[in-house]
Image (spheres, grey):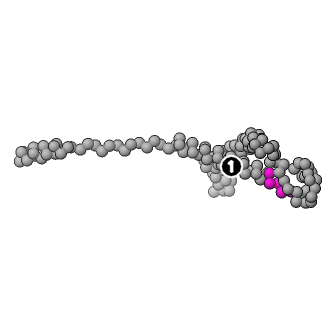
Amino acid sequence: MGFISEFKEFALKGNVMDMAVGVIIGGAFGKIVSSLVDDVLMPVISLATGGIDFNNLFINLSDDTKYATLDAAKEAGASLLTYGTFIQNVFDFLIIALCIFLMIKAMNKLNRKKEEPAPEAPAGPTQEELLTEIRDLLKKK
């Protein structure tokens, strides 16, 4: 079997195609969550913390020069510790993890088959019926 035919067989397997679809949807989902964090949650958090813009939180490691914004510090070529970006990424991660948890929980709930009650054992003969049957068998002898 040649290299190309092996690759074709590998690439067209269902698992590989499912994974490709998952990666594409995951990328789009990441953009949605980033927008949720950047455009919805962070402004609310910023408002609650007195107008702090997390994207502009940084420490200049180069010298004592104060820069008004992160962009100005980057333009000046300063060595920066951008901890605000880290905080932003932590929020992104937590929200993505929560969304994935909720999705998996919902999928598991949908996939869980309702536990069917165990079929009741067929009712056997009662004690009286057994005794009657034994009596009839003895009478026949």
| Nearer to the camera, 141 or 1 | 141
Q: x and y percent of residue 32 in the render? A: 72, 41
Q: x and y percent of residue 77 in the render? A: 92, 55
| Nearer to the camera, 116 or 68 | 68
Q: Is residue 101 left or right of residue 27?
A: left
The amino acid type found where label 1 is placed reads Leu
For label 1, the residue is 94
Taking the spot 30% from the left edge, 45% from the top edge, the residue there is 121
The N terminus, quarter of image: bottom right
Q: From what the image shows, is residue 41 above or below residue 9?
A: above
Farthest-out residue, top: 40
Taking the spot 65% from the left edge, 44% from the top edge, the residue there is 99
Q: Is residue 136 left or right of residue 107?
A: left
Q: x and y percent of residue 4 in the render? A: 68, 53
Residue 82 is a magenta residue = yes
| Nearer to the camera, 12 or 5 | 12
Residue 31 visible in the current orientation: no
